[in-house]
């Protein structure tokens, strides 16, 4: 067997089959390119679901991690460390907020946001104990913990994990009327993705996000924005909500915050909201550890210049123009997205999203499918226009075969 076949066979024999990866085994990566164990190079148009916004092996992030590795990597929150205060301060400033509650993975941050909303509802809004309700959108993807999949509408994510956590109301994404009708005096929060990533990069109708902001403010309900995939430069703004001039009560961040080097996530909000926590009421051994803070501080510094947001905006215009031309030729039914992020619905007659992804892999381009015939394109923000065009040419080749 080849090195690829050997590695995959070993993985299949000794790991749970909770993923179905493409049959490529990556050995190294730099920028927007990955190299497999056979020495073949592939253009990465997925960027770790936006965790790698700044590319593979970004020198600034690697140097920051190396320097911190030589000093201290973990203290637990039992002690202070000298990177924590700066991390919280800089991230709060980036978000124009006041307080930060750091965690590790995106799912942990969403769980933290749920706990925050419930505690705020009981302590501040005065909702009766055990009666708090959080409204979410259909086709959401916020993670895979038991509580989070309890309000998923994806059968693959939800089936066989009951009994499910109560306290959530699901309404159609983009439907303000349904949202208004679902609100009660016990509603403590609305939790939504400004752009739904796993659902196929779904952008809500114009006016929806400002409408959510207005409704939540009127009804004294927290607006929690899950910007784990859409935030930190991906759409051409620091946050996807900025495209419609909306500021939520709570940001949920992750993925790119760790630069693809270490898992870093956070809930960012005002002192009135995150101030409901007292010592011992929530925590994480690794949350806000020195290594995570060092890397995230470098990510924040990179975002403060605005250059990555501008690059995503400029290349995003080009990406959507080129994909739009494909949509007029019959091979592509619909293209959605914003900035360097696109969901492409392939005509079912050409194959499933998985089949198209596998054909692109043969052309040395890596993307990932979702929901039938949809593929997602989300390259690192550092990709060159020439490399992006090369990847789009390979897509044209696959669609015309």
Image: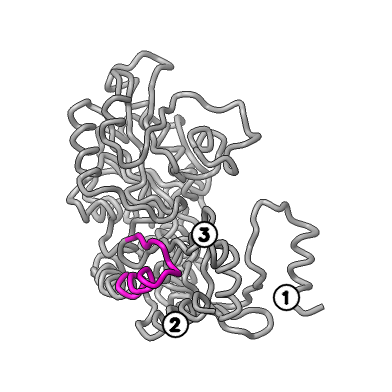
Q: Secondary structure at mark 2?
A: helix
Q: Residue 377 — which label?
A: none
Circles 1, 3 touching at the beta carbon (< 8 Å): no
Task: Answer whether residue 334 is magenta in the image.
Answer: yes
| Residue for point 35% across, 60% down | 336
Residue 226 position, x and y percent, is: 37, 46
Task: Answer whether residue 258 is magenta in the image.
Answer: no
Nearer mark to the viewer, of 1 and 3: 3
Residue 303 position, x and y percent, is: 29, 65
Circles 2, 1 touching at the beta carbon (< 8 Å): no
Pointer 1 local density, CA inside 10 Å: few below 14, some 14–19, many at least 20: some
Q: Nearer the viewer, residue 205 or 329?
A: 329
Residue 17 position, x and y percent, is: 71, 53
**From the viewer's perspective, is residue 115 above or below residue 92?**
above
Q: Residue 373 — which label?
A: 3
Q: Which residue is mark 2?
A: 393
Pointer 2 local density, CA inside 10 Å: few below 14, some 14–19, many at least 20: some
Query: Left or right: 362 with respect to 112?
Result: right
Q: Residue 4 — which label?
A: 1
Q: CA distance from mark 1 to mark 3?
A: 26 Å
Nearer mark to the viewer, of 2 and 1: 2
Q: Nearer the viewer, residue 303 or 320?
A: 320
Q: Nearer the viewer, residue 138 or 261?
A: 138
Quadrant of the frame with the C terminus:
bottom right
Would you identify the image quadrant in which residue 127 lies? top left
The stretch in magenta equals 320-337
Quadrant of the frame with the N terminus:
bottom right
- Compare marks 2 and 3 and give the one earlier in the sequence: 3
Pointer 3 local density, CA inside 10 Å: few below 14, some 14–19, many at least 20: many
Q: CA distance from mark 2 to mark 1?
A: 26 Å
| Residue for point 58% across, 38% down | 158
């Amino acid at each position: 067997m080849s090195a690829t076949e050997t590695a995959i066979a070993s993985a299949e024999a000794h790991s749970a089959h909770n993923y179905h990866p493409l049959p490529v085994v990556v050995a190294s990566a730099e920028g927007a390119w990955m190299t497999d164990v056979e020495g073949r190079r592939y253009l990465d148009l997925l960027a770790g679901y936006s965790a790698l916004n700044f590319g593979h092996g970004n020198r600034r992030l690697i140097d920051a991690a190396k320097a911190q590795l030589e000093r201290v990597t973990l203290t637990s929150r039992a002690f202070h460390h000298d990177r924590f205060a700066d991390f919280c301060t800089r991230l709060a400033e980036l978000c124009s907020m006041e307080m930060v509650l750091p965690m590790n993975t995106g799912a942990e941050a969403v769980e933290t946001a749920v706990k925050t909303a419930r505690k705020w509802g009981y302590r501040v809004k005065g909702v009766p104990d055990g009666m708090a309700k959080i409204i979410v959108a259909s086709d959401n993807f916020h993670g895979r913990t038991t509580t989070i999949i309890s309000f998923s509408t994806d059968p693959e994510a939800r089936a066989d994990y009951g009994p499910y956590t109560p306290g959530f109301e699901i309404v159609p994404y983009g439907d303000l009327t349904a949202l208004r009708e679902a609100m009660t005096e016990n509603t403590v929060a609305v939790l939504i993705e400004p752009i739904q990533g796993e659902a196929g990069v779904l952008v809500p109708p114009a006016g929806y996000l400002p409408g959510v902001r207005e409704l939540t403010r009127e009804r004294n309900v927290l607006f929690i924005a899950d910007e784990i995939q859409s935030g930190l430069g991906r759409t051409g703004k620091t946050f996807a909500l900025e495209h419609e001039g909306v500021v939520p009560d709570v940001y949920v961040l992750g993925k790119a915050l760790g630069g693809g080097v270490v898992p870093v996530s956070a809930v960012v909000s005002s002192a009135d909201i995150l101030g409901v926590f007292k010592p011992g009421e929530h925590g994480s051994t690794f949350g806000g550890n020195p290594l995570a803070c060092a890397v995230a501080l470098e990510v924040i510094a990179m975002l403060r210049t605005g250059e990555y947001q501008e690059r995503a905006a400029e290349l995003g215009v080009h990406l959507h123009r080129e994909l739009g031309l494909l949509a007029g030729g019959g091979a592509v039914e619909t293209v959605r997205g914003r900035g360097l992020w696109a969901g492409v619905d392939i005509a079912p007659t050409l194959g499933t999203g998985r089949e198209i992804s596998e054909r692109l892999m043969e052309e040395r381009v890596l993307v990932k499918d979702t929901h039938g015939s949809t593929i997602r394109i989300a390259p690192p923000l550092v990709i060159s226009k020439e490399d992006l065009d090369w990847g789009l040419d390979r897509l044209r080749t696959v669609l015309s075969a």
